[in-house]
């Protein structure tokens, strides 16, 4: 089959992109990153990707470019790169329907909550405000509805008494850097598939795998 060519979409620091790249080098992912695409030219992750010798591209939304046009151009960049999987990693734009349909089953995202709880932004703050006992992160297939696609794997932790947003988000990120490479590794190995709106691991859909913080 050969190593899976995949692309990573970022808007910021790119720590998940770097975790994925590390996993391609140490064999946890039988794949290679063929393109790192950002919607922001100043994303710190772009420099980090360039330093690693990865191909990068910037597709900045301009007011004249509607969401459909943006999606078309993004697809062109990704098709040209040869990517067979697209991993959203801190990519802050909502992708329009035609784009999502075109990449359906080949489009993953990492979200900083235990979906279906806390879709959307500012998850750490909202979790703390609600006094939740558990929090974490989820890798899921992307569907048109925001943060609603089937979950593949989750990282879970217990919120500590009196914990602030800073430490909580750092702990969640450490889990992100474990679960995202694992999910992409499964996809590259042909173990993770999409079937009619469900995520299958080794042909079954038992619900997402859970990784506990201290496991
Ligand atoms: C992560 O927390 C991810 O869950 C969210 O955006 C953040 C991206 O961080 N979608 P990084 O750019 O990968 O460091």
Image (cartoon, helix red, strand yellow):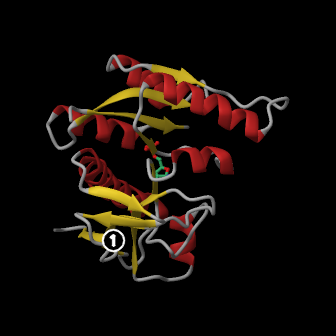
Residue 39 seen in render: no
Task: Residue 212: name its quadrant.
Answer: bottom left
Outermost residue, right side: 64
Q: Is residue 76 above or below residue 24?
A: above
Identify which residue is drawn at 17% across, 44% down.
28
Q: Residues within 10 Å of mark 1 (few under 14, many from 20)?
A: some
Q: Is residue 67 above or below residue 79?
A: below
For ligand 1, tell me if the residue under mark 1 lies within 8 Å.
Answer: no
Q: Is residue 99 above or below residue 24?
A: below
**Along the line of sight, which residue is nearer the eye, 140 or 213?**
140
**Along the line of sight, which residue is nearer the eye, 33 or 50?**
33
Return the x and y of residue 16 as percentages of the image width and height. Answer: 38, 43
The image quadrant where one finds the C terminus is bottom left
Indicate left or right for 31 with 45 as reference: left
Question: Disc count in the image?
Answer: 1
Residue 14 seen in render: yes
Q: Secondary structure at mark 1?
A: loop
Identify which residue is drawn at 40% across, 59% down.
194
Indicate left or right for 137 with 185 as reference: right
**Along the line of sight, which residue is nearer the eye, 200 or 29?**
200
Residue holding disc 1? 208
Indicate left or right for 51 with 44 as reference: left
Return the x and y of residue 131 as percentages of the image width and height. Answer: 50, 83
Return the x and y of residue 109 as percentages of the image width and height. Answer: 46, 52
Identify which residue is drawn at 65% across, 28% down.
73
The image quadrant where one finds the N terminus is top left
Task: Residue 121: name its quadrant.
Answer: bottom right
Return the x and y of residue 6 as percentages of the image width and height. Answer: 37, 35
């Amino acid at each position: 089959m050969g190593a899976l060519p995949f692309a990573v979409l970022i808007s910021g620091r790119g720590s998940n992109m770097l975790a994925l790249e590390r996993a391609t080098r140490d064999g946890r992912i039988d794949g290679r990153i063929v393109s790192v695409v950002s919607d922001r030219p100043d994303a710190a992750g772009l420099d980090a990707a360039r330093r690693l010798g990865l191909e990068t591209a910037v597709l900045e939304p301009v007011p004249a470019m509607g969401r459909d046009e943006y999606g078309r151009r993004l697809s062109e960049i990704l098709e040209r790169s040869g990517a067979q999987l697209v991993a959203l990693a801190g990519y802050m734009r909502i992708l329009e329907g035609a784009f999502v349909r075109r990449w359906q089953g080949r489009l993953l995202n990492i979200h900083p909550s235990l979906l279906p709880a806390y879709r959307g932004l500012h998850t750490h703050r909202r979790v703390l405000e609600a006094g939740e006992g558990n929090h974490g992160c989820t890798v899921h297939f992307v569907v048109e509805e925001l943060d609603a696609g089937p979950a593949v794997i989750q990282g879970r932790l217990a919120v500590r008494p009196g914990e602030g947003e800073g430490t909580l988000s750092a702990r969640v990120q450490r889990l992100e850097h474990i679960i995202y490479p694992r999910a992409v590794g499964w996809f590259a190995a042909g173990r993770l598939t999409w079937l009619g709106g469900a995520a299958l691991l080794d042909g079954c859909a038992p619900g997402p795998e859970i990784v506990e913080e201290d496991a």
